Amino acid sequence: MRIAVLADVHGNRFALEAVLADISSFKPELILSLGDTVLGGADPVGALKLQLECGAVMVRGNADEEVANHELNLEPDRLEVVNWLQDLLVESDLKTLMNLPTMLEVANGEILACHGSLETPWDFLMLRDDPQSFTDYASPDELLSRIQNYPNAKVVLCGHSHRARNVIARGVLFVNVGSISRQPDGDPRARWALLTRDENGWQVEHNFTEYDVEAAAKWALENAPDGILEAQKLRTGRGV
């Protein structure tokens, strides 16, 4: 069984198109998308449309809540982008984002998929409580305590921090799949992961996909209210 997993598209249709082209060559049985779908400035409507058309099974990210929940109090700069997105998206798209689950169980409960943590898209599954940085990682015992109500879990998937990482804790594979857009490390390539189950259990392979960064930056500059900043994030590969 093969499952392609992506996260943190952040409205980057250009990166997502390239990733979906890569994914198609592996012919996975399922595509999982782990949230933060549209909050970005490189054709966010197109990015959402691609995920819906490819049949990706999606969970809700914190940025999806920011876009779809009109009751959240946001900083002025964030609010400007959110208002722009709310004007671009139709009401059914906003309802789709808000109604996405926080967590999914896949493959008879062997796989748990979330954006941030199993309880909320705002927390970080693979970081310590109250982390001081994005590399303040939880211990294996801490990770296992967070899935104690899911005894069948073999793989736990998340995004949110944009940093790809694997940890094996007593046979359970914890995976942050990295991000499609807004990279943290100076490499603008899109990240995604391929899960494969064979006679030895579940294996994960992290993939890096090149895309037309300049075309994405140009779209942002011409259309997004924060286009200069968005283009800088895309071009430098430093977006968080």
Image (cartoon, rainbow, N blue to C red):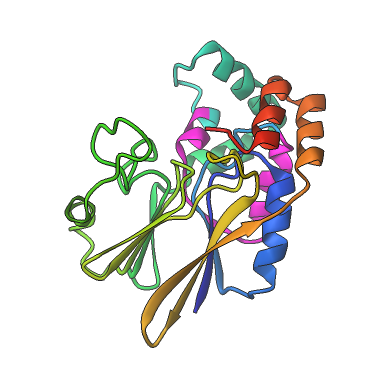
Residue 18's spot in the image, x, y percent?
72, 56
Q: Residue at x 65, y 44 (%)?
A: 188
Front residue of 182 and 117 = 182
Furthest residue toward bottom: 199
Residue 147's spot in the image, x, y percent?
23, 56
Question: Height in image: 82 above or below 239?
Answer: above
Q: Residue at x 36, y 80 (%)?
A: 201
Q: Residue at x 32, y 46 (%)?
A: 125
Occupied quadrant, residue 23:
bottom right
Residue 99's spot in the image, x, y percent?
48, 43
Question: Height in image: 77 above or below 55?
Answer: above
Question: Height in image: 36 above or below 50?
Answer: above
Front residue of 140 and 57 = 140
Is 45 inside the magenta-drawn segment?
yes
Q: Residue at x 25, y 40 (%)?
A: 128
In the picture, measured across the screen, residue 147 lies left or right of residue 74, that is left
In the picture, measured across the screen, residue 175 lies left or right of residue 21, that is left
Residue 234 can be seen in this image: yes
Occupied quadrant, residue 93:
top right
Front residue of 211 and 62 = 211
Question: Height in image: 54 above or below 7?
Answer: below
Residue 70's spot in the image, x, y percent?
51, 23
Occupied quadrant, residue 154:
bottom left
Furthest residue toward front: 186
Residue 90 can be seen in this image: no
In the picture, measured across the screen, residue 150 lies left or right of residue 16, that is left
Prevailing secondary structure of the magenta residues:
helix
- Magenta-drawn segment: 42-66
Total labels: the figure holds 0
Is 119 inside the magenta-drawn segment?
no
